[in-house]
Image: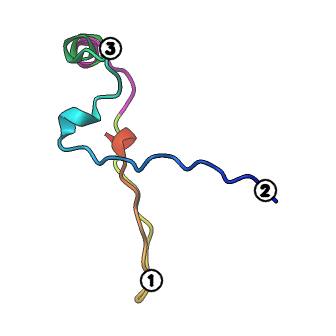
Amino acid sequence: MSKPTKSAPPRQLPRSFKDLTPAKHFAPGKFFRELVLKALVTPRWGQSRHPVFPKLKSGEVAITWIGHASF
C-alpha cells in the first residue's frame, strides 16, 4: 500500500490588487523610478511601420494578436 500524500492548503483569493504584491520587499517607488521613469527618458530608435493585413475572401476570418509588445 502507498502512503497517503499531503495536499496543499486551499489557496486564498486576493481581496484586492494590493494583495497581489509579488513580494514583501517590493517597493512601488523604486519600481516606478527604475522602470517607468527610465523608459520615459530613454531615447528610442527605429522606424514605425503600418500594419499589413491579409486580403480575405468572403467567408474567411483572420485573427490579429495585439499584445503589450505591439505598443
Residue 40 belongs to magenta span: yes
The kind of residue tagged 3 is His
Residue drawn at 43 percent across, 72 percent down: 62
**Viewer-nearest residue: 31 or 22:** 22
Q: Which residues are magenta?
A: 36-47
Q: Residue at x 41, y 50 (%)?
A: 10
Q: Quadrant of the N terminus?
A: bottom right
**N-terminal-most mark, 3 or 1:** 3
Above-or-below relation of 44 to 34: below
Q: Earlier in the sequence, mark 3 or mark 2?
A: 2
- Report the residue marked by disc 3: 25
The answer to whether residue 42 of the structure is visible from this angle is yes
Residue 14 percent coordinates (x, y): 25, 43
Q: Amino acid at mark 2?
A: Ser
Residue at the extreme bottom = 59
Label 1, residues with CA under 10 Å away: few <14, some 14-19, many ≥20: few
User: Residue at 65% of width from left, 50% of height from top?
Assistant: 5
Query: What is the quadrant of residue 43 in the picture?
Result: top left
Which residue occupies the foreground of this view, 69 or 9? 9
Distance between the alpha carbons at the discs numbered 3 and 2: 41 Å
Q: Quadrant of the C terminus?
A: top left
Side (left or right) of 54 relative to 28 = right
